[in-house]
Image (spheres, rainbow, N blue to C red):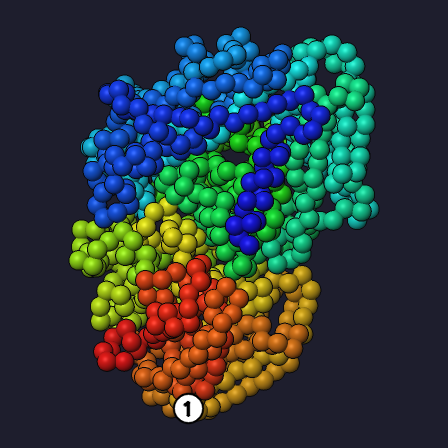
Amino acid sequence: MRTFTGLLLVLLTFLALSCQPGSQVQETRLHDSWKFRNVANEQWMPASVPGCVHTDLLENQVIGDPFYRLNEQNLQWIDKTDWEYRTNFRAPANLLKKENIEIVFKGLDTYADVYLNGNLILKADNMFREWKVNITSIIHAGDNELKVYFHSPIKFGLAKHDSLGYTIPVSDNDQSVLGGTGNKRVSIFTRKAGYHFGWDWGPRLVTSGIWKDIILRGWNDASIENLYVHQDSITEESALLTVSCDMVVTGEGQLSLQVTADGSQVLSKDLTLSPGSHRLSEKIIIKNPELWWPNGLGNQKMYNINVKVLRGSTILSEANTRIGLRTVKVVQEPDSAGKSFMFVVNGHPVFMKGANYIPQDVFLNKVTPDRYEHIVGSAAETHMNMLRVWGGGIYEKDLFYDLCDDKGILVWQDFMFACAMFPGDSAFLENVRQEAADNVRRLRNHPSIALWCGNNECLSAWYMWGWKDTVMARQGKEVADIIWKAYDDTYHHILPGVVAEYDPGRFYWSSSSCAGMGEPENRVAGDVHYWGVWWGKAPFTTYRTLTARFMSEYGFQSFPELNSIKKFALEEDWDIYSEVMKSHQRSSIGNGTIEYYMLQDYKKPKDFPMFLYVGQLLQAEGTRVAMEGHRKTMPYCMGSLFWQIDDCWPVASWSTIDYYGNWKAQQYFARKAYSDILISPQIDKEQLSVYIVSDRLEDKEGVMDLSLLDFDGNIYWTKSENMVISANSSHIAFSSPERELISDLSMKNRLLLYCELTVDGSKYSENILYFIPVKDLVLPEPKITWTATPGENGYKLTISTDKLAKNIYCSLVDGDAVFSDNYFDLLPGRTVEIQASLKDKVSKEAFTEKLSLVSLTDSYQDGN
């Protein structure tokens, strides 16, 4: 189903770009017969377009897998070399008959000189921009030669760095030492994905290549561009929209404009336009509109809008887009605690549950439609309603936003600036303005876009990381003023100006995190990135006490599972302090910090595979405190976006889904912590509180059941209460001093509180509270039994236990399986059914032979 959905969206995108039957516009993709070479030699090799140098070298067996063991370190020469791509093509005869012929480069990475039939037609210098060139007088019948010469981004960056005359602060995420440039961090001088230069979760593999489509486009008389549908107003009876587009006209004569919504005509108008460029703007009405809602609150109705320009019955040009009708406002109102920061969708405050999102691969051409479907689908499946597209990556491909539209995932969209100050010369700023305009125009019709954000942590770095003071001390006030002016020009003038011009009404936020325009973060206004847990080694419980109005970053690391480790490391590397494991860990405090936190809460694992398992539990349990804790403080806090949902290579990181697509323990925990109705117990200062949190827009009736039992299943206390679960709220449903609940406190190491919430007659949310750290629990050795029966796409597992089985982990040894639930606690005498889905058909005998089930006691005991 995932693959089908992904391919369907690709097909829809293709149809949106291509001409419809009868249209005079013709488009042809130039993806075939490409070759490339290192300009230092004459050896041409086959190349893929879209693609990049690294993957082309890998396909031609010039280099080994960049992700395997320490291979990355030996590939740093690639970014210091110039590369050339070429192809020969024959233009379709009917395209050559068009009066206007253009070539469109959707994405060139990055410094690219483009030649057509020996003519220099373009000098590109921005990975994020789209480039269009009229080639009517250059293209011809027969063979045409297209060449793209990519200059080394490192050589360009070094030249700009050395000529500047002062040093601009850049975080050490730019791994310049590994890249061979010493302390010269040059990533900021090139409008290119920052994470390619390294990050504290990513490798340093600085790519070049044709990373998006190249399209030949021919047309006569008129061409529609930049179709935009602005929602003016909406009521239950009608939605008033403004449809606008840019049009280039070269022919003479009367034209007509037709607009349809879901196939029904909503506008037909005659036009008299002289040759030249025009911006058309017309009002349309959709009657009885159906709203688009975030995931969990309603349907995601999408309207297909089609605009045609005709001469008589001949379609000269047409454009298509999809829209969703909804209102999204970011409300910042003074209150007794400071100032709110909440998203109000269709008139209702909505708590944002989600994660930060990075590019899914360092080599962008490797991200297939199925991978997009998997990550966005996983977010929706785990009750998320927001993903933050982080500013050190890319403005994502159209398919990503289409999927977010369809699944109700709102997007916090950063502009591509992160963890650095940037140049402020006029050429750089104009390049930025054009980049922003390109991407705002491309994405503004998506209902999933919730806000535009200027940068990631650049403001925090200047004021809170000590950069301003360091520049003042070492380079003087004049340089500090120059650097700050560049910041002010970019994030306080250029970017909000672009949003106001091309996407009026959409909210602009200057930096994440911050309290307002130019105001560093605080906890009573704006959004906060909280890293006291991890960098500050604060205990996980501080997630509950140090909340803010919107928590846009926080998180904890883990390694991927053993099957993933085996794909990039040998068994001799299975030690967190081996050279390979340290290389696949880019946080400066990484593996030691995981171990430090682990020993606070867990017994030392007996071996490396068990370290991986316990490490994932550590990440999941720790960040669950945050996910649930933030929700419990609503409406003070109205957003919780953990760092991060995905990886760009196999690595120890903050991700909850590893590079190979496997859910870590935290992703399973997120599904429960982000449930739209949640029951969540906690103990603070020996006081037990059981919270009920609801994101529903209406009250619900429910039953709360609480049970105190020991690990053998003996019940000591129960409570059952009927209740009304208030809409869109958090409240304490039960509270008691711990001593009143547990008469013998020496029993705390073998007791648990089971909390269950029944809604509409079925179990809706459950949670378990342990009264002391896991390492101090007297866990029994459970007898876990299971049976496997054939099920849809795999096997149904029925699992039982005689005693508490803590954190049952199911895996397929050297196999590929997706489990519907995992890392879960199973109470004594209980039975659970889960589905094991397999990509390939496996016999029951082979499946049962490879199936592994462990619980926490197996992590530190032998002979189980």
Q: Residues within 10 Å of mark 1 (few under 14, many from 20)?
A: few
Residue 541: x, y in percent?
A: 39, 66
Residue corresponding to mark 1 = 743
Tell me where residue 158 sits by quadrant: top left
Residue 408: x, y in percent?
A: 60, 51
Q: Is residue 172 left or right of residue 541?
A: left
**Residue 463 higher or lower than 111, as above or below:** below
Quarter of the picture containing the N terminus is: bottom right
Q: Is residue 366 left or right of residue 678?
A: left
**Residue 575 higher or lower than 304, as above or below:** below
Q: At 42% across and 72% down in the image, what residue appears?
A: 844
Of residues 276 and 568, the one nearer the viewer is: 568
Of residues 646 and 739, the one nearer the viewer is: 646
Q: In this orientation, does residue 425 appear?
A: no
Q: At 55% across and 68% down in the image, what residue appears?
A: 678
Residue 437: x, y in percent?
A: 54, 27
Tell me where residue 318 sits by quadrant: top right
**Residue 569 higher or lower than 813, as above or below:** above
Q: In this orientation, does residue 312 appear?
A: yes
Dot 1 lies on which element?
loop
**Residue 785 higher or lower than 550, as above or below:** below
Residue furthest toward the top? 137
Q: How many marks?
A: 1
Type of amino acid at the residue the image marks with label 1: Ser
Residue 80: x, y in percent?
A: 25, 27
Of residues 249 and 797, the one nearer the viewer is: 797
Q: Is residue 609 left or right of residue 522?
A: left
Quarter of the picture containing the C terminus is: bottom left
Q: Is residue 803 left or right of residue 588?
A: right
